[in-house]
Image (cartoon, rainbow, N blue to C red):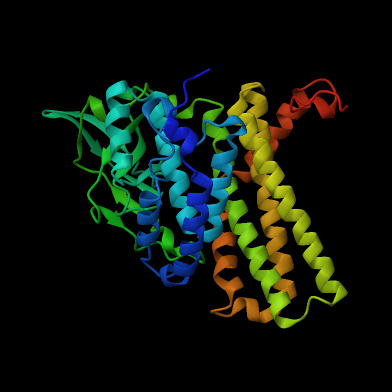
Amino acid sequence: MDQVTPLALSYDAIAAARQVAETAATRAEAHDRDGGFPTEDVADLGCLGLLAAPIPSLAGGAGLGEEPGGRRLAAVLRLVGYGSLALGRLYEGHVNALQLVARYGTPAQRERLFADARDGHLFGVWNTEPHGGGLVLEDGADGLRLTGAKTFASGAGHVTRALVTGRGPGGSGTVMLVVPLTPGSRADLSAWQPHGMRASATGTLDFAGITVTAENILGDPDDYFRQPDFSGGAWRFAAVQLGGIESVFDAWRGHLAATGRGGDPHQLARLGEGAIAVEGARLWVERAAGAVSDGVLSTERVVALVNLARLAVERAGLNVLQLAQRSVGLQGFLHPHPLERRSRDLATYLRQPGPDRALTAAAEEILRAGGMAGDLWGDGAMP
């Protein structure tokens, strides 16, 4: 059994996340604008130890995510997403980056980048590229240099340690790099005028001319795509989405209580259906986090389960949105009703890439599998 540091035992990440969620919820309306960003909330993540929490326990950190079943990390992501989906999106990217550093970094890289996290740097993982303008690592007269850009980069202009993917020189595969960035530099947010998630500062970042060295390159070519971590990591954004679903549900529930409409049997029926959807999403997230964390299932089975989980959470979110909007009516579409921004943010964040491919890939694995349906996910026979 790995040695666990006193910090990992004593730090209460869930209490910290609950505190962040409470304050983020009070600021979310002010951040909901073009060019908005939850600066104070990110600072709270640092002050309360959550930016450093994913540092492994063997490196002197709190080891968030090392716990059996990933239960603490799932709860933290859910709570942060409950307070602000934009903040949850940013924090999930930060966690993802630190987990990749822990997995693929050299000892020197881990020491340096974990120190950056302790110092309050916000990390992000950016892998989406504009058509024809992807990131390329080129050999130059003075060393390696980047050309190209990343798009749909959440936290652009605010992330100061960007973990990005790019094509290596001479067709050497896809490489991961951690690139230090200056706040406010190289980011273009002009195209980010979305229905929701306005405060996530999602945009395009131009890397042209940035010089990199071997200390910026993480792992070996194509490590970024290793399974089950590449597809299995989707459970983390599903956990953030779950927080957003719960926030919409509570805004809806609060409206019924405040307006005295909870006695209507049709309203009660809708609320009951919503509660079923919320709890189903929570159970799927917990199951997916456990499958990735515990490492009992095969790689193919883990990926299939996480794919189903992300789609089940999406379905639950769409269901809760439809039920809440029908119950509340037109008021829920008018600012500043608590449901209005929450609904826009959730509807936008539920749009994750490749849902059809995720579903059919999971179904293919299920079709290949033998045995009973109850044994697909390693449960064995029921007692």
Q: Is residue 33 visible?
A: yes
Q: Residue at x 46, y 40 (%)?
A: 11
Q: Is residue 328 left or right of residue 8?
A: right
Give the image location of residue 210, x and y in percent. 20, 40
Query: Relative to 383, is 338 above or below?
Result: below
Is 97 in front, or is 21? 21
Which residue lies most toward the top here? 1
Relative placement, left or right, of 176 versus 291 is: left
Residue 203: percent from the left, percent from the top?
37, 55
Q: Is residue 348 left or right of residue 33?
A: right
* Residue 222 at least partly seen: no
The image quadrant where one finds the C terminus is top right
Q: Quadrant of residue 82?
A: bottom right
Residue 248: percent from the left, percent from the top?
63, 64
Q: Is residue 219 above or below residue 95?
A: above
Q: How many numbered discs? A: 0
Name the residue at 65% across, 21% down. Answer: 298
**Residue 313 in the image, given as x and y percentages of width and height:** 67, 49
- Residue 187 or 25: which is nearer the viewer? 25
Give the residue displayed 74% in from the left and 74% down from the top: 327
